């Protein structure tokens, strides 16, 4: 999809890049949900682990700490973690606010360049970078949950 965006018109390219962002976050959400569902019985609250959503990383980070005693952010540098948070917040704007920046986005994403009322900009390189960071997060999550549940 990202490769296709490189040769598309500006408007089509923007949609393709937005779709790619949404798709990779949805895939990570599905992966995290299934992993937690499979290991739910080894958590501190199986019902909560079975229904955990990975759409809000700040919330899921704390919940994973409570359920499995693991810190999702350990896989990344603080700069990388902030990049992922910002990408998830951009996805939220696309999905729920037609891509228009609001105060909540500015606050949660820490995006100092964002202007409330303007459309969010997403670059192809951002999505490619996010894919790599989500791979790191997914691998770390899988390893840590496996380790945490083996110790239980």
Image (tube, helix red, strand yellow):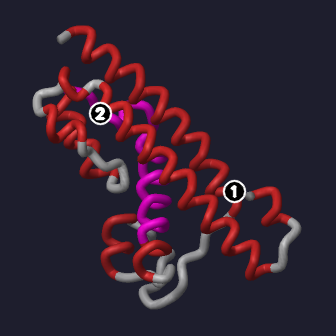
Residue labelled with disc 2 = 37
Residue 92 drawn above or below residue 40: below
Magenta range: 69-92
Is 88 magenta? The answer is yes
The answer to which of 100 and 41 lies nearer the viewer is 41
Q: Which tag, 1 or 2, sits closer to the chain's start?
A: 2
Is 119 magenta? The answer is no
Residue 151 drawn above or below residue 94: above
- Classify residue 88 by image quadrant: bottom left
Q: Nearer the viewer, mark 1 or mark 2?
A: 2
Residue 40 drawn above or below residue 82: above
Q: Position of residue 22 (x, y in %)?
A: 54, 61
Badge 2: few (under 14), some or many (20 or more) residues near its Cα, within 10 Å?
A: some
Which mark, by number, is residue 125? 1
Q: Position of residue 21 (x, y in %)?
A: 58, 59
Q: Residue at x 24, y 51 (%)?
A: 59
User: Which residue ends up furthest to the top in the rendered image?
Assistant: 151
């Amino acid at each position: 999809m990202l490769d296709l965006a490189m040769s598309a018109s500006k408007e089509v390219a923007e949609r393709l890049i937005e779709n790619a962002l949404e798709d990779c976050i949805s895939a990570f959400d599905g992966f995290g949900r299934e992993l937690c569902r499979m290991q739910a019985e080894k958590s501190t609250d199986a019902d909560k682990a079975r229904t955990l959503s990975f759409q809000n990383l700040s919330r899921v980070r704390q919940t994973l700490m409570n359920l499995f005693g693991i810190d999702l952010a350990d896989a990344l540098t603080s700069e990388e973690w902030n990049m992922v948070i910002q990408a998830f917040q951009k996805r939220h704007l696309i999905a729920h606010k037609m891509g228009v920046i609001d105060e909540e986005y500015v606050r949660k994403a820490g995006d100092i360049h964002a202007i409330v009322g303007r459309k969010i900009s997403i670059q192809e390189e951002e999505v490619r970078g996010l894919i790599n960071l989500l791979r790191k997060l997914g691998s770390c999550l899988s390893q840590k949950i496996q380790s945490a549940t083996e110790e239980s």
